[in-house]
Image (spheres, rainbow, N blue to C red):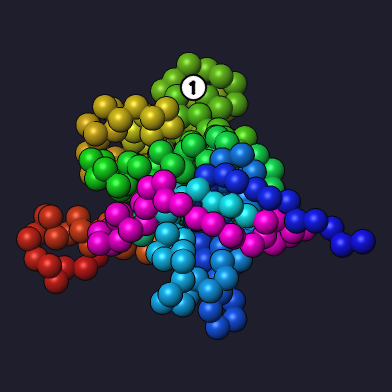
Amino acid sequence: MASVAQRIEDVAVVLRSYQLGEADRILSLLTQDHGLLRAVAKGVRKPSSRFGSRLQPLNHVHVTIYQGRSLGTISAVDSVRLYGSEIAGDYVRWSAGHVLAEATERLVPEEQEPARPHYRLLVSGLAALAQDQRDPRLVIDAFLLRSLATGGWAPSFGDCAQCGAVGPHPWVHLPSGGAVCEHCRPSGAVSISPATSALLGALLSGDWDRTSQAGSTARRAASGVVAAYLQLHLERELRSLPIADKAWLSELSYKLTGDQDVVA
């Protein structure tokens, strides 16, 4: 006896899409109540598609899906907020949004299992990019640290990650979980400045007042620590992260020099 498809209505963020056949796309979606889902949007690539541009990556939508065993079919879509469309004209913010989406897809542990904390972080991160009031690279780093913490890999950048000795400490050893004191410091630990340590702690806690006070040197050093910590747990780099880095550095060079032809 054929199984009956489950009807799902939920809000979701479109993480990515890829072509299927001549007119369809398979979408990866993070939903509020049903976790990570994959579903086909039939005819979405046709100019006459009833879905329009609402199913573009990074958009926040309300969807109706008829879910099969592994792949669903989207039957209806309504807009909640089209973040992807809002930031599409700004390459720095657009590329940052794709880092958030790719990281989310990699860090959510299982399909069709609730992942509300990851969903809330993603929506908040996209909203921050759309508001354009914070450095996109800081948004990326805060999002990645907090997503890793949500997944059970919370680092410590204050007290010693090994013995709990009150910090801050000038050493970081990522396989040990972050900051380490002089007594626990293993071979391979690296030194970081107090400003970088403070910025990492602020990014992890979401203290935007403190992050906005950080200088460019601390920001770059913190980004390196975050990228290394992410790679440690994912075992390979996000494909979208170097693209976002290049876009951010290019914009920074432009702001510092006033020369649009400068590319970092």
User: Disc count in the image?
Assistant: 1
Residue reaching furthest top? 166
From this view, report whether residue 138 is shown above or below residue 168.
Answer: below
From this view, report whether residue 150 is shown above or below residue 181.
Answer: below
Identify residue type, mark 1. Asp
Please give the residue where the numbered disc 1 appears in the rendered image. Answer: 159
At x 38%, y 47%, the residue is 81
The answer to which quarter of the image holds residue 221 is: top left
- 235 sits to left or right of 113: left
> Helix, strand or loop at disc 1?
loop
Residue 141 position in % (x across, y down): 40, 43
Residue 229 position in % (x across, y down): 51, 45
The residue stretch that appears in magenta: 66-94
At x 47%, y 38%, the residue is 121
At x 59%, y 76%, the residue is 20
The answer to which of 86 and 182 lies nearer the viewer is 86
- 238 sits to left or right of 199: right
The reply to whether the magenta stretch includes residue 105 is no
